[in-house]
Image: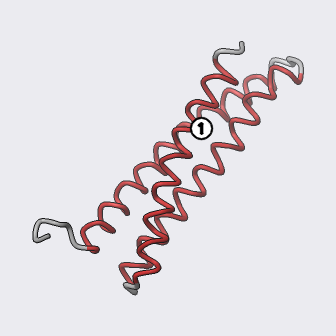
Amino acid sequence: MADAPSHKDVILALVGVTSALAGFVLVFLGVLVSEFQALLSANLGKDAKRGFRQASYVGFGTFSLCLLALVLGVSWLLSPHDPLYDVALVAALAALVALIGLSVYATFSVLLKG
């Protein structure tokens, strides 16, 4: 498999992707929080705010997972070990799945409910 990428190439791509995902999630989280704060000033009921609050919690968890994957990738670059490589790959895939989950959750629980 001469054409297979090296572990270092994969981790460098992983670091770039997870940092971009973290930035994307942070912007999305900022939109959710600003909408929640607008609802606070509008004195609406708890039901109107619940979806934004829960989606914000899910967004913060997704952001944290993206940062964990980023830290694992950078850690592997500093000290390459095969188990750390595998954990970094799994964390990056989990961050991507969490982003998809956040998008679906926010769409159905916040946007389409109201």
Query: Residue 85's image quarter?
Result: bottom left
Q: Which structural element holds mark 1?
A: helix
- Measuring from the top left, give residue 30's x and y in whole percent: 59, 38
- Measuring from the top left, give residue 62's x and y in whole percent: 59, 49
Is 52 located above or below residue 92 in the figure?
Answer: above
**Of 2 and 5, which appears nearest the observer?**
2
- Measuring from the top left, give residue 41's x and y in whole percent: 80, 23
Amino acid type assigned to the residue bearing label 1 in the image: Leu
Locate the C terminus and report the quarter of the image it occupies.
Answer: top right
Q: Residue at x 59, y 38 (%)?
A: 102
**Of 61 and 6, which appears nearest the observer?**
6
- Measuring from the top left, give residue 43's x and y in whole percent: 87, 19
Q: Which residue is drawn at 67% across and 43% down?
A: 58
Q: Residue at x 58, y 30 (%)?
A: 104
The residue lying furthest to the front in this view is 1
The residue lying furthest to the left in this view is 2
Query: Residue 89's image quarter?
Result: bottom left
